[in-house]
Image: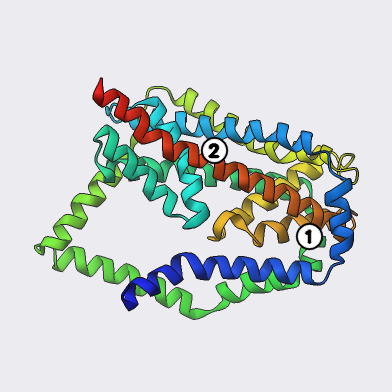
Amino acid sequence: MDFKAILRTFLKIILPLAFGCLLLWYLYSKMDIGEIWNVIRKGVHYEIILFSLLFGLGANVVRGLRWGLLIRSLGDKVKTSNVVYAVLGNYAVNLVLPRVGEVWRCGMITKYDKIPFTRLFGTLLIDRVSDTVTVGLITISIILFNFGFFQNFFAKNPALLEGFQSMFNSIWIYVAVVIFIVGIWFVFTYMSNFTLVKKAKSMLQNIWEGMKSVWLMKRKGLFVIQTLLIWIGYFLYFYITFYAFDFTRDLGITVGLIAFTMSSIAVAVPVQGGIGPWHFMVIATLVCFGVKETDAAAFALVVHTVQTIWLGLTGLLGVIALPITNKKINNG
């Protein structure tokens, strides 16, 4: 293995995982592990958590169906089971290589349904943007109706707010953006005859065609319904676990929505399975609502571990099923 390959492996796998594990260690090193273990061993109704997993699986299946709707809006034919298995497998790949799962699922549909990768990538962008918009709308709604919580949250975690402020107060971020935009303009304006630039233009055109799928689709209402079902499923996937612990079962749906929103924001951090950031957000949120820190830590550890194993198992099912189901068709 050459140095470049080692560096890529370090940047893609080891560095994000090390960051997540370091944050996890930092969070739990200050707590009474014995007390947390007592909650995990005696204070959890695991049957409720196992029941909640069905909603996570259901949401991911609907995500696959929605992606299929986007692909078909471009006039391409795609097998329904392929998009569902690819989306499930996407999460298993992301547990190893953060954000690589999205590229992998496009590659699988290109392989088995013979659709150009760049067209699929365009539909994937719409898929992700629609989810980002949904999370954004949920977050804005939660902030507007629970402004006091966020004031309290950032008062208890000032480093988070300071980090955002310092990033946007730095002139270098604006300089970098301007240089990037000017560089792109120069390349596409004065170097348009270069073969590499022509290929880039063609790729961007295909991506744009894929992104237009949301405007071209005839069944926009179904797309909206599926998006709502996905996020209702994800919320229930998270919120039902409140009833598995005595200290969260009576917190109510509003606290559940706030904790769910904070955990969804944490998942945006490119770390395998959100390990570390997810725990931090959930623990900090529950503590703000009066849950004891060790109890909140036990909640985060149990729920995240069980859900991560579930994602891995259902994702592995998708990875294995893709070649098997397509082999049967090809042989038939």
Where in the figure is residue 82, as x and y percent of width and height?
Answer: 38, 31
Numbered disc in front, either 2 or 1: 2
Tag count in the figure? 2
SS category of the residue bearing label 1: helix
User: Observer-nearest residue: 151 or 277?
Assistant: 277
**Separation of disc 2 and disc 1 at Cα?**
29 Å
Location of residue 209 by image quarter: top left
Where in the figure is residue 211, as x and y percent of width and height?
Answer: 35, 41
Where in the figure is residue 228, as x and y percent of width and height?
Answer: 59, 31
Location of residue 52 by image quarter: top right
Which residue is at a point 66% across and 48% down the rendered structure image?
139
User: Observer-nearest residue: 172 or 93?
Assistant: 93
Residue linked to disc 2: 314
Which residue is at a point 89% across and 54% down the rendered structure image?
38
Location of residue 4 by image quarter: bottom left
Judge from the rendering whether residue 99 lies leftward or rightward of residue 292; answer left or right: left
Judge from the rendering whether residue 88 lies leftward or rightward of residue 327; answer left or right: right
Please name the amino acid that badge 1 sits on. Answer: Ala
SS category of the residue bearing label 2: helix
Please name the amino acid that badge 2 sits on. Answer: Thr
Judge from the rendering whether residue 179 lies leftward or rightward of residue 134; answer left or right: left
Does label 2 or label 1 sit earlier along the sequence?
1
Which residue is at a point 23% across and 47% down the rendered structure image?
205
Q: Which residue lies furthest to the left in this view?
A: 193
Where in the figure is residue 16, as x and y percent of width and height?
Answer: 53, 66
In the rendered structure, are the residues bearing label 2 and label 1 in contact, judged by CB atoms less than 8 Å apart? Answer: no
User: Observer-nearest residue: 125 or 147?
Assistant: 125
Judge from the rendering whether residue 138 lies leftward or rightward of residue 194; answer left or right: right
Looking at the rendering, in which quadrant would you find the N terminus? bottom left
Residue linked to disc 1: 284
Which residue is at a point 27% across and 44% down the rendered structure image?
117
